[in-house]
Image (cartoon, rainbow, N blue to C red):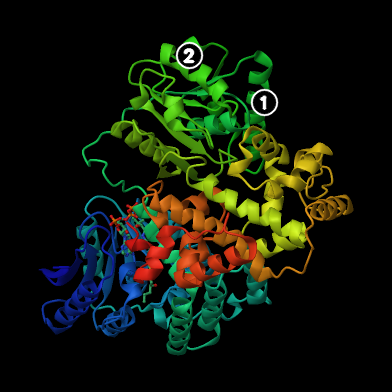
């Protein structure tokens, strides 16, 4: 049962009960319609309340139904019935009235809510627009500008703010249902107050309002389909009579629903919720309590990691080997906080509270009380060995010992201690205080409750924790190697750095692969190539970067890398010197430089990455292809509207086409890096998708 009707004297309550979030499934739509029919038919019922059982009001349309044919009645039909009712209707809102849920409430005469409730139209985050009257009703109730802003951001609006906007009529305390019933009873006998009958004031539209909104949105929501349609729909609320506006909204909603971006963003919604479900981790495993944390290393990573804990109110001890390093690290942290304060996002007092939570030390003894220790020192096994041997001596029994290594073996590092079950990887992404991804790397001997602790702490510091298995580079950096290799090879073969980068940015990446190298520092790859067995990587791919490093062009930090940079400016400027290095290096390898198309740039960069992703999946390094997508969305800025690299390969390209392209590049460039993953071959042969990979 997804709903029921309760008569409370002369007020009828339509109860919706569809756990966990009262998503408006087919059964809920039927229950709403039935309730409205009963209310209309009953001579005793003079007013109606729509209320929800459980933890929330309706959180929106049931997204799981979007992939199949829509079963009648649709939500617009339900809302038409609500509009047609002859008796006043009040929505009783607690929890979250989102999307279609808020649209049901907007079609009621009045909305009462608990102060803790939130309302909102988050459809834009799913590549959609409010498709059940929201684009026509919210502007009438709340005014054009706030309504448009709410729909373009999709962000939740706290009930007190919604009250101020006019989108909620009354905040109540205590028994919400009783308060809504009393409110509804007061309205008995009054004519209905339908939002559709309200008119926007003729002067509601400042000159050029919609053009300005379109231009601003094109910049702020680059490449996104639905925001522009939201503006079109809201414009219709102003220029067309209500019924025609609704019709326009419907057309635009369907355009969005058919667009590939919406499917990708729905995939992201479910991928985000899947990622915390860890196969094989018993449901009753309890995370270890973490009240204090220690970070070893106050460099860029260590400092950024420390900020996450201070931001969450968790005391953090920060260890460095010398006073100078410690002071430099603390100085950078303070500068970061002060920059945030200067933007008005922190008060001076908050800056001091957070700095106060970070306790600097030069002594390992100060780490003895920490529940979690995260090592963020230099990326060599020699250095890590010393750190973990020392930690094994000083850390308290039961402390979780984590390494922030990007590539090294967790099992090897765990082997430096007498407690490998307590050791795992917690791999943060730079800048560590900003990027939402945390790769949680389980070693062979990591205890289940240690894994659960890392995932729990990820949530506490507002990161998305993705579990990865132990291999060189784990999920993200292992796949990145293919991406960077192809980006660099394309430059040798004939593309300019800017041509490669522009193609990737046009695709939706926040920056190109060569710009990314400049940002991270070309010396990092240079050092790692010197340390690695050349049989494990493509030396040609590093040849240009190696020469640039030897010329002192280390990237942005020296204002020269693949590009030139002006002091204090991150805008890449093409460099003639680099063009010469590229040509000489290509000639040295006997490469005939040629025209490279945008299509080849995209296919080679992303398919190289996806092919490795298939291996990551085949080897069980990632549990699901959607986990890989989440790594790329939150760790590397892959555009969410393309769903992640694996979703892109499966749904934009198609796995058979992806395999064919990989084979084609293998024929052209040799099989060393273009041998198709056996998993990809199997899935294509069996006509399956990534969901059936394991
Ligand atoms: C829309 O309304 C279109 C209309 O304008 C037009 C129609 C014509 N459907 O997030 P949680 C599941 S578009 C189906 O972990 P929380 C979720 O997958 C919709 N399932 O909880 C998870 O399942 P599982 C506009 C949904 O407390 C479980 O519920 N609405 C839906 O952290 C718990 O979710 C939205 O976009 C759904 N709509 O957060 C709101 N919502 O346990 C989307 C959730 O199997 N939802 N589930 O993994 C949310 O923002 C959050 O879920 C909410 C609760 C804040 C409500």
Secondary element at image label 1: helix
User: x, y percentage for residue 568?
Assistant: 80, 43
CB within 8 Å, label 2 to label 1: no
Quarter occupied by residue 217: bottom right
Left or right of 79, for residue 457: right
Q: Residues within 10 Å of mark 2 (few under 14, many from 20)?
A: some
Which residue corresponds to mark 1? 331
Counting the numbered discs, the total is: 2
Nearer to us in this view, 645 or 165: 645
Image quadrant occupied by the C terminus: bottom left
User: x, y percentage for residue 391?
Assistant: 45, 16
Query: Which residue is pictured at 26% across the width and 63% down the height?
Result: 22
Q: How crowded is mark 1: few (under 14 residues within 10 Å), some or many (20 or more)?
A: few
Left or right of 238, for residue 688: left
Nearer to us in this view, 440 or 201: 440
Nearer to us in this view, 571 or 478: 478
Nearer to us in this view, 593 or 134: 593
């Amino acid at each position: 049962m997804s709903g029921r009707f309760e008569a409370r004297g002369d007020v009828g309550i339509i109860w919706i009960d569809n756990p966990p979030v009262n998503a408006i499934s087919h059964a809920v739509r039927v229950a709403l319609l039935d309730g409205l029919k009963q209310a209309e038919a009953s001579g005793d019922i003079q007013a109606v309340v729509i209320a929800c059982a459980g933890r929330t009001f309706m959180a929106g349309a049931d997204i799981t139904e979007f992939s199949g044919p829509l079963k009648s009645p649709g939500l617009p039909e339900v809302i038409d019935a609500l509009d047609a009712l002859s008796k006043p209707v009040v929505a009783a809102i607690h929890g979250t009235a989102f999307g279609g849920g808020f649209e049901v409430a907007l079609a009621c005469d009045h909305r009462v809510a608990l102060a803790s409730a939130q309302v909102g139209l988050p459809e834009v985050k799913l590549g959609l627009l409010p498709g059940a009257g929201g684009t026509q009703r919210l502007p009438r109730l709340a005014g054009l500008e706030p309504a448009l802003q709410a729909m373009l951001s999709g962000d939740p609006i706290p009930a007190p703010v919604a009250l101020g906007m006019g989108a909620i009529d009354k905040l109540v305390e205590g028994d919400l249902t009783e308060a809504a019933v009393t409110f509804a009873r007061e309205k008995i006998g009054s004519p209905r107050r339908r939002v559709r009958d309200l008119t926007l004031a003729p002067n509601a539209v400042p000159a050029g309002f919609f053009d300005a909104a379109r231009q601003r949105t094109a910049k702020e929501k680059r490449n996104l389909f639905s925001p522009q349609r939201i503006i079109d729909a809201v414009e219709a609320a102003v220029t067309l009579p209500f019924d025609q506006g609704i019709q326009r909204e419907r057309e635009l909603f369907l355009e969005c629903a058919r667009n590939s971006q919406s499917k990708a963003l729905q995939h992201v919604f479910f991928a985000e919720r899947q990622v915390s479900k860890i196969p094989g981790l018993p449901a009753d495993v309890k995370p270890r309590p973490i009240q204090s944390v220690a970070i070893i290393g106050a460099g860029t990573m260590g400092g950024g990691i420390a900020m996450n804990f201070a931001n969450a109110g968790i005391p953090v001890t920060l260890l460095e080997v010398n006073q100078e390093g410690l002071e430099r690290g603390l100085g950078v942290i303070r500068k970061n906080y002060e920059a945030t304060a200067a933007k008005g996002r922190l008060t001076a007092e908050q800056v001091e509270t957070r700095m106060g939570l970070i306790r600097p030390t030069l002594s390992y003894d100060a780490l003895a009380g920490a529940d979690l220790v995260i090592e963020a020192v230099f990326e060599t096994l020699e250095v890590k060995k010393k750190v973990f041997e020392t930690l094994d001596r000083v850390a308290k029994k039961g402390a979780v010992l984590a390494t922030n290594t990007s590539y090294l073996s967790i099992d090897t590092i765990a082997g430096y201690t007498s407690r490998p079950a307590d050791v795992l990887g917690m791999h943060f992404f730079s800048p560590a205080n900003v990027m939402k991804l945390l790769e949680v790397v389980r070693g062979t001997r990591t205890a289940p409750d240690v894994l659960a602790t890392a995932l729990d702490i990820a949530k506490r510091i507002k990161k998305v924790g993705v579990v990865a298995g132990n291999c060189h580079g784990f999920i993200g950096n292992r796949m990145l190697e293919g991406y960077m290799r192809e980006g660099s090879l394309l430059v040798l073969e004939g593309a300019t750095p800017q041509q490669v980068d522009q193609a990737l940015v046009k695709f939706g990446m926040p920056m190109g692969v060569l710009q990314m190298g400049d940002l991270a520092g070309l010396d990092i790859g240079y050092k790692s190539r010197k340390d690695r067995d050349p049989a494990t990587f493509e030396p040609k791919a590093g040849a240009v970067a190696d020469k640039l490093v030897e010329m002192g062009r280390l990237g942005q930090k020296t204002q020269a890398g693949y590009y030139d940079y002006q002091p204090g400016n991150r805008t890449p400027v093409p460099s003639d010197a680099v063009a010469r290095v590229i040509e000489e290096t290509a000639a040295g390898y006997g490469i005939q430089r040629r025209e490279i198309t945008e299509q080849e740039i995209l296919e080679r960069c992303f398919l190289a990455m996806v092919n490795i992703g298939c291996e990551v999946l085949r080897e069980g390094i990632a549990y699901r292809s959607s986990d890989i997508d989440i790594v790329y969305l939150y760790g590397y800025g892959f555009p969410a509207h393309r769903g992640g690299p694996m979703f892109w390969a499966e749904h934009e390209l198609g796995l058979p086409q992806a395999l064919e392209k990989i084979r084609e590049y293998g024929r052209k460039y040799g099989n060393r890096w273009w041998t198709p993953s056996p998993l990809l071959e199997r899935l294509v042969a069996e006509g399956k998708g990534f969901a059936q990979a394991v």
